[in-house]
Image (cartoon, rainbow, N blue to C red):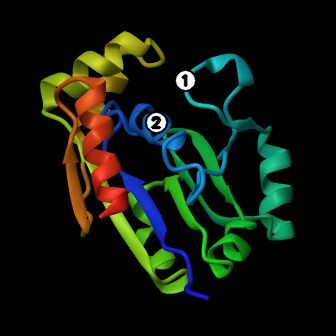
Amino acid sequence: MTRGTLFLIVGPSGSGKDTLIDGVRGRLARSHLFPRRVITRPRDAGGEDYASATMAEFEACERAGDFALSWRAHGLSYGIPASIAADLARGTHVVVNVSRGVVDGARVKFAPVKVIEITAPREVLAARLKARGRESLTDIAERLLRQPEVKADAVVVNDGTVAAGVAALLGTLQG
């Protein structure tokens, strides 16, 4: 049996990663798994579908080995369920939204790995971040300054309609 590919979706805040992932999920449900992230964000914060955890719960899960990947960013902690290792071994492709900081470790631990960067022009990112209403203007400005480099296998520029972005990501995941 061929091992599944781990697709790491990366990009700046406001690039539309979760929107595009949501858009391809139903079309790829038979061949790709889209696990829910665990985030130390209150459940009522809106946005993506995630499992909320307190910091104590998150750290306990980390110590227990419940995460395949975990990281801290923007004052929150994020984890990807360890169950993806078995899914990949069974030949299922797995798609996850992650921090660029975990890419190198994931490439070693879960080969084959494909990194897909979702991006958009700075003014589009700023408008999207402002519209979602979770950060102050100062926080948004700081996020826009943080754009670390990552060696991506593919780049999707998400600066048009949602349908166009979804089509581009779909083509990349299937190609």
Q: Position of residue 56 (x, y in %)?
A: 84, 46
Q: Position of residue 101 (x, y in %)?
A: 42, 63
| Quarter holding residue 91 | bottom right
SS state under label 2? helix
- Can residue 149 be seen in the rendering of this structure? no
> Dot 1, how many residues are within 10 Å of its Cα: few (below 14), some (14-19), or many (20+)?
few
- Can residue 151 be seen in the rendering of this structure? yes
Look at the numbered discs 2 and 1 and tell me whether their residues touch, using CB distance below 8 Å: yes
Q: Position of residue 175 (x, y in %)?
A: 29, 64
Given the image, on which type of amino acid does mark 2 rest? Answer: Asp
Residue at 35% x, 33% y: name it.
16
Q: In the image, which disc is placed on residue 47?
A: 1
Q: In the image, which disc is placed on residue 18?
A: 2
78 versus 6 height, above or below: above
> Dot 2, how many residues are within 10 Å of its Cα: few (below 14), some (14-19), or many (20+)?
some
How many marks are shown on the rendered structure?
A: 2
SS state under label 1? loop
Q: CA distance from mark 2 to mark 1?
A: 8 Å
Q: Position of residue 19 (x, y in %)?
A: 42, 31
Q: Relative to the observer, which residue lies in front, 165 or 14?
A: 165
| Quarter holding residue 69 | bottom right
Answer left or right for 90 relative to 60.
left
Residue at 36% x, 11% y: name it.
131
Given the image, on which type of amino acid does mark 1 rest? Answer: Gly
| Quarter holding residue 80 | bottom right
Answer left or right for 43 relative to 23.
right
Q: Earlier in the sequence, mark 2 or mark 1?
A: 2
Residue at 49% x, 35% y: name it.
22
Q: Relative to the observer, which residue lies in front, 32 or 99?
A: 32
131 versus 123 height, above or below: above
